[in-house]
Amino acid sequence: MSITLSLRGGDPARVATPLLAVGLHSGGVFPRVLAALDRAYGGVLSRAVRQGDFKGARDESLLIVGSGRGPARVLLVGLGESSDTYAVITRAATLAGRKGNSMGVRRMAFWAPQLSGDTVEAAAFGLSRGAWDFTDYKTQPAAKDRPKPLVEAVVIATNARGSQAALAAGIALGEGQRIARRLQQLPGNVCTPEHLARMARDIGKRHTLRVSVYGRRDLKRLKMESFLAVAAGTPQDPKLIVVEYRGGRRGEAPVALVGKGLCFDSGGISIKPAQGMEMMKYDMSGAAGVLGAMEAIARMKLTVNVVGLIGSTTNMPSGTSMNPGDVVTASNGTTIEILNTDAEGRLVLADVLAYSARFKPAAIIDAATLTGACVVALGNSATGVMGNDDALVDEVLLAARRGGEPGWPLPMWDEYKEMIKGDIADIKNIGGRGAGTITAALFLREFVPAGVPWVHLDIAGTAYSETDLVIIPKGPTGVPVRTFVEFVRGRAR
C-alpha cells in the first residue's frame, strides 16, 4: 500500500494530527519555534530535553501523549550530530514513519528544523521508506482488531510553496524503493521471471516506456548460451527484460542499468548448503533495483536517456542442468568453462552486458548479489564497487554516498585476471579461494562492450539484512535503487 505525502507550512502546534514526529538535534537546547507546542503540552517537551530524558541522539525516540487541540501525540526523534543534513533527516523520518506505522495511527506529520528544498525530499523519502510493510501472507485479525497502516503523512516545511518539486522527488524515490523492496520480499514461487517481466510492463504502461521481453526461444536466436546454461535446469521461461526511458535528447547515448534477476538460486549441481538457502530468493535484488530505479526516474522526468536491462531465471539442479566442466559460448563469442554452477549470476550477466552494446551506451552500471566473498570483505555496510574507468567509479561512489548506500572500491589489477584464465576455454567462471569478488568483476569485464565505461556493484552484503536495522526491519533494503537514481540524476544536472 502506498503512502500519500503532502506539504504544509505554519506552526506545528496547530496541526490536528494523531501523531506529530519532531526531529531534534543533540545538545539539550529546545527550539524556540516550538514554544506553542511546548505550552500545549504543559512544558513537558522542553523539560524532557532540559532534564536529559531525551538527548537527541541518533535513533533515539520518546513518545508523549497530549490532550486538547493540535497533535494528539508527539514523538521526539533524535537527529544526532552528523553534518550530513540530508542523511540525518532521511534517517529520522524513516524511524518516525516506521514507528507511526506500528502505532496504527493512519495519519501523521513530521517536523524538523529548517525543512526546505532537499531536506523536504529527504523527509518525504524517509517517511515512505519507514512506513513500508509487507503483510501479504499473514492472516489478519478481525477488522476491529486489525492495526491500521500509515497511509498519509504531512511534511511541515519552512517554505512549503517553494518545496513542491522536492516533495515530488521524495515521493518518486520512495515509490521506486517500495517497488524494489516488494519484489525482493516476494517468495520465489511468486516472484518468477514472468512476474518481473509483468512488473516491467506495468511500469512501462504507467509511464509510456518501451518494454521488450525475450524468452528462451529468443535467447537461443540471440546465441546467449551462457545465459541459457543457467536456465537449462528450470522449466520456467527465462527472461531478458529491456525497459527504455527516453528523457534526453533524441539519439543521445543512454545510461545502461543492468540487474541480475535470479529469482531463486539453489546453486544448481554445485548445490548450496540447506541452511540459509531460503535467503536466495533475494538473488534478484539487482533486477529489483533496476525496476525501482526506472519507476523513480520516470516519475522525476529526468532529462537523460536510460535503458534498464535484466537477465532473469532460476538456477536449479535437474537432469537438464549445466554441469561443472561444461563449456559454453557467450553471445560475444567468448568461450566459458563452467567450473562451479553456483557462480551463475556472472553467466547470466555476461550475455546481458554483451547485449547492451546495441544501445551504444554512454556508461553501464550493473548490480548483482554476486559473491559471498564481498560479504566477507566488506560485511553488510558497504557495496563493492569495481570498474574499467576510474572517473566513472568515482562518479558512482559519489552517487552511492548521496543516496545513503555507501560503496567501497576494490582493485581490478590485471594480475588477478590470471586466476580466471581458462584451461580448455577462453575464461572460467571462478578463480581460486582468494579475491572472489574481484575475479567475478573481471569475468564480467570480458563482456562489456569495447570502449564503454562500466562499473559493477556487488550488493551481496547490502541488498537485504538478516537482522533488524532499527530504521528498517529484517529483510530487503532496496539497495541499489538510490545509487542508480542519484547517478542518473547527476547526469541530468
Image (cartoon, helix red, strand yellow):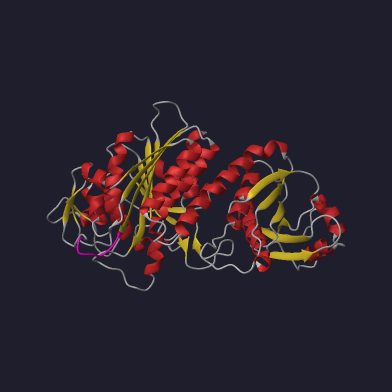
Q: Position of residue 480 (x, y in %)?
A: 46, 51
Q: Nearer the viewer, residue 479 or 220?
A: 220
Q: Position of residue 481 (x, y in %)?
A: 48, 49
288 in relation to 135, above or below? above
Residue 385 makes an appearance in the image: no
Q: Nearer the viewer, residue 353 or 85?
A: 353
Q: Main secondary structure of the magenta part?
A: loop
Q: Position of residue 299 (x, y in %)?
A: 54, 39
Lateral position of residue 314 relative to residue 252, left or right: left
Q: Nearer the viewer, residue 102 or 480?
A: 102
In the displayed image of the protein, which residue is found farthest to the bottom? Answer: 275
- Identify which residue is drawn at 26% across, 64% down: 268
- Identify which residue is drawn at 19% across, 46% down: 334
Taking the magenta stretch, the answer to whether it contains residue 284 is: no
State the extent of the magenta-drawn residues as a range.
Answer: 315-320
Where residue 184 sits, quadrant-wise, is: bottom left
Q: Position of residue 465 (x, y in %)?
A: 48, 64
Please identify the quadrant where the N terminus is shown.
bottom right
Q: Nearer the viewer, residue 50 or 262?
A: 262
Residue 185 makes an appearance in the image: yes
In the displayed image of the protein, which residue is found farthest to the left? Answer: 424
Where residue 169 sits, quadrant-wise, is: top right
Q: How many marks?
A: 0
